[in-house]
Image: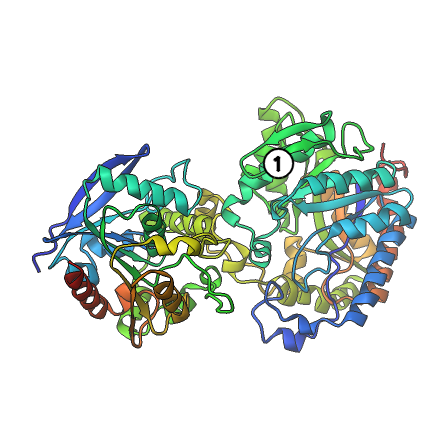
Amino acid sequence: MATSNVTELRHQVAGFEIQTRRFGQGPKLLFLHGAGGAGDLFPGGEPVRFLAEIAQRFEVHVPEHPGYGVQERPEWLDNIHDLAYFYLDYLEAAGLQQVHLVGQSIGGWIALEMAVRNASALRSLTLVGAAGIHVTGVPKGDIFLWSREEFARRMFRNPEARESFLGRAIPPEQQKAFLRNRETTALLAWQPRLYDPHLRKWLHRIDVPTQVVWAENDEVLPPAYGEELARLIPNARLDVIPDSGHLLHLDRPEALASRVREFIGDAR
Amino acid sequence: MKFYYMTLMPYSVLDLKEREKYPTAWVNLPNRLYDKHQGRKLYDAYIGDLVRADQLGFDGVAVNEHHQTAYGMMPSPIVIASILARETKRCKIAILGSALPLRDHPLTLAEEHAMIDTISGGRLISGFVRGIGAEYHAFGANPATSHDRFHEAHDLIVRAWTEDGPFAFEGKHYHFNYVNIWPRPFQDPHPPIWIPSQGSSETIEWASHPQRRYTYLQTFSPVPLVKRFLDMYREAAKRQGWEAGNDKLGWAVPVYVGATDQEAMDEARPHFEALRKYFLKMPMEMLLPPGYLTLSSMERVMSAKGSIEGDLAIESAVEQGMIVCGSAETVRSQLLAHHRNIGFGRLLTLLQFGTMPPEMSERNQRAFATQVMQPLREELGEAVVAEA
């Protein structure tokens, strides 16, 4: 595939040097990663299959959130709102006007918080198993109590994806990044768990074409969360991928990539 | 050396067969396994033990805080310490400790401790802790802000105790316009502060700071670790320009006194092993939620890959000094040897543990008081008086 020419970009935003991997050709697409960080998306430096697939049609930008990876967490980072404002500044610094925004899990939550504040730079919004709201009476999975094995069992339906996840040891030099990712995820999402009680009140402000993609067997945020988001965001469309787990981009990469390509193609 | 009677108040009548169906006694062990009548009886027995400890001449009694667990029925040590403020007459009352970051309004702690200190006529020892990792699951408190909240709550409480109010406290996590507590603590400038810990260089560095000089208490650890951490405290104090006496150092350990070494071992065995296997054990994810330890401490733990709180046979526990168990003579000589080797001025004895029933813990407590504590005091040449 001609997509593996990954360029590393650096931008100064709010006193933090953010690193972005850019690859592919076409309209600009910003992908905001989830709790696993950006490292998980580039094993051996190459983009995972989902990203490689969408890079055939888009110029894909994958930044690593402040508080994730090898860099120390910036002092100012306390909550998800800080990341929303940070990324709104980042869009300007990185020259990403009219960008397709795709966010997975916590990345989807950041995308939502950005979009309710200012969606003027967004051409479309794709939410993949996004956190950010709570649905009363529908418990979320307690990711912080799961062992690695239980995590793998609950996050994947595709045995190949599960095996590949379990088979990948964390190299010693990545140990600290792995622990930092968990720590920042707790900082952002421990309490209230994976949501902002004030976000749902303002989701009606999102006025860009929005697609909500959900895993049928999501055990972190059950499909009722996808349904609720699609109900709260004007004209959002919901697409549930059968027989799939929360980490859709790893579990069902082709299915997710085709949903993203089709939807954004329509949205253009 | 000062002697303290410490209790965890376990739900000692826990149905162990039922317990085995779950990974741990913490956070999500169903509370249908709790029986209110048994609970009432146990409180009665445990409070009776604490009051008797005063009568038997212990220098102090100690209670602690754990939430939503059969390991201890003491989510509020404040409640028990309040009772003891009236029911005991002479001994110190140590809360070891209050879990500061779990409180959204830590001024309530400044107030409650000041009340107990006053009601008891200045007998309170205030312990400050963060709570163990499981507490953060049980309470929904964020482990990633635990260190920050601990330090801020500590500053707030000490200032509330020592500065004239009203004043404003302007922190990041806590912000109050009026800090102006009534009552103020009875002791001047405030109750002694103790810091119980399972061993952390960061905690030791902080507790030994010349402005604090808080008593450091090593809980339930093998003897070499106890020695290592107490030495670390002494060295940290020296480096910071002061000499830490033994009164600044404590050790908490289960103790069992039997007629002979073998009888002691056989009697203590099921209860001690139950403590480890059924009450203490918990998965790593529960014990160490993200952010609870600093990244570098967490890295060390991960690389050590140590087993946590798993099964431990009493023989190896005795060998490691995780429990002091034997005839009165054995217990005496071992404690004396540890005292001379490690150098601690405060011994916190856990004389009821795990499934041990009330009549057995009472016997153990009486045996310890008369056959170990009193002779040791004589041997160490210490007067049996309440500490100043």
Which one is in front, A221 or A197?
A: A197
Instruction: Count how many numbered circles sit on residues in the image.
Output: 1
Q: Which chain carries label 1?
A: B
Figure quadrant of the N terminus of chain B: top right
Quadrant of the rendered image containing residue B40? bottom right
Above or below: residue A210 compared with residue A157: above
Q: Is residue B183 left or right of residue B54?
A: left
In percent of the image, x 52 and y 49: which residue is there?
B143
Q: What residue type is labelled 1?
A: Asp
Which one is in front, A116 or A35?
A: A116
Residue tagged 1: B231
Which one is in front, B146 or A119?
A: A119
Q: Which percent across, then down, holds residue A234?
A: 32, 61
Q: Which percent across, then down, holds residue B87?
A: 90, 50
Q: Is residue B220 left or right of residue B334?
A: left
Query: Tag 1's secondary structure?
Result: helix
Asked whether residue B221 appears in the rendered view, the answer is: yes
In percent of the image, x 84 and y 37: which residue is there?
B118
Q: Which percent across, then down, holds residue B99?
A: 65, 47
